[in-house]
Amino acid sequence: MRIGKDLIDAIVAHSRDDLPNECCGLIGGSDGEMKSVHRARNAAATWLRYEVHPTDQLRIMDRIEADGEEMVGIYHSHTKSDAYPSQTDINLAAAWPDPLYLICSLADRDDPVVRAFAIRGGRVEEVDLDVV
Ligand SMILES: [Zn+2]
């Protein structure tokens, strides 16, 4: 999956802005490329987990569709742990198996790490990000 460096930077910036809580958002794209990052509120408002605010979700999905893109990814941050899906993340993904899940870890504040995963049927598989 191709993704622009500017989009990675936007996800890292959002992750930092929402500290100490986890942040979350949606990613639009097409033709195997991620093209837009959309911030959503974390309705859970905690550093323990994320919950894409339902109003934001509808608004962003309309916007992505209007732009001729599809919702290809969901991102959130881990403020203290590695960029790897937690059991909570795996459970949450059961309802939404198609998008890729991008996780931005700020465990090392000076060295943010963004990784992508397919989470389907309770299984986690890392997907290479081709940062352009
Ligand atoms: Zn998580």
Image (cartoon, helix red, strand yellow):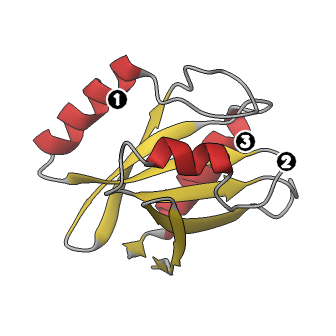
Instruction: State yes or no: discs 2 and 1 in contact (Cβ < 8 Å).
Output: no
Q: Mark 3 points at which residue?
A: 16
| Mark pair 2, 3: CA separation | 12 Å
Q: Name the residue under label 2.
A: 80
Q: Earlier in the sequence, mark 2 or mark 3?
A: 3
Q: What residue type is labelled 3?
A: Arg
Q: Mark 1 points at which residue?
A: 57
- Badge 1: how crowded within 10 Å, few (<14), some, or many (20+)? some
Residue extending farthest front: 121
Image: 28 above or below 51: below
* Secondary element at tag 3: helix
Q: Where is residue 87 in the image (x, y as percent from the top left)?
A: 66, 49
Q: Earlier in the sequence, mark 1 or mark 3?
A: 3
- Badge 3: how crowded within 10 Å, few (<14), some, or many (20+)? some
Q: Where is residue 11 in the image (x, y as percent from the top left)?
A: 57, 51
| Mark pair 2, 1: CA separation | 25 Å
Image: 65 above or below 86: above
Q: Residue at x 88, y 58 (%)?
A: 108
Q: Which amino acid does label 2 sit on?
A: Lys
Q: Residue at x 44, y 69 (%)?
A: 4
Image quadrant for the C terminus? bottom left
Q: Residue at x 61, y 56 (%)?
A: 103
| Mark pair 1, 3: CA separation | 21 Å
Q: Point out the frontmost of discs 2 and 3.
A: 2
